[in-house]
Amino acid sequence: MRRKLWAITIGIGLLIMGAGAAVMGADQDIQDHPSCKYCGMDRQQFAHSRVIIAYDDGSVFGACSLHCAAMDLALNLDKAPVSIKVGDYHGKALIDAESAAWVIGGDKPGVMTRRAKWAFASKADAERFIKESGGKPATFDEAMKAAYEDMYDDTRMIREKRKSKGMQKHEHQGHKHN
């Protein structure tokens, strides 16, 4: 009886430790890249829109949004992305950006953009979002194209917001370009 109790106790302990490690590993990208180097936004706070790009040279970039990820991709033309993961809008877990179901637009405010671009782990989640909040279904390529199309208006909007709040240029820590 004691052996069974001991085995069950150890088993439960290992499950708890494994779950804790999985949770810690799931947010490792946030620990490694706590804020976006372009805008300074807290990637934990924006876990639902964060992006992590692994390049072929071994470098990794963590963004708060598809807007900032698009900037990094444009500024690093000589590096090829080997993996792009994005936060699932609902669950916040990282998912493959290319296989995600995307929604462009809707009435939920976007991150660093007027026209939101959200990723979902499933097509059903994306369709539910569209029914509740509007927007249109899209692929990753369509979401990236929209991010580039919106870049001028979005950067102008960001500058105006910062100016109205009295924020200084390069106020954020870690704001340096490669």
Image (cartoon, rainbow, N blue to C red):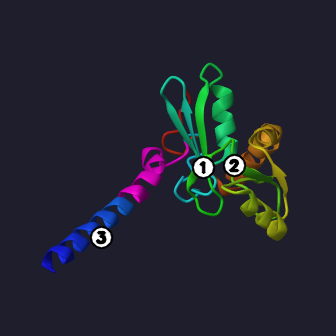
Mark 2 is surrounded, within 10 Å at the Cα level, by few (under 14), some (14 to 19) or many (20 or more) other residues, namely: many
What segment carries the magenta color?
21-36
Q: Residue at x 55, y 45 (%)?
A: 36
* Quadrant in the rendering for residue 8: bottom left
Q: Main secondary structure of the magenta part?
A: helix
State the separation of the CA atoms marked 2 and 1: 7 Å
* Quadrant in the rendering for residue 108: bottom right
Q: Is residue 136 above or below residue 173?
A: below
State the residue position of label 3: 12
* Quadrant in the rendering for residue 90: bottom right
Q: Nearer the viewer, residue 72 or 136?
A: 136
State the residue position of label 1: 95
Q: Amino acid at mark 2?
A: Ala
- The disc, 2 or 1, on the residue closer to the chain's N-terminal end is 1
Circles 3 and 1, Cβ within 8 Å, touching? The answer is: no
Circles 2 and 1, Cβ within 8 Å, touching? The answer is: yes
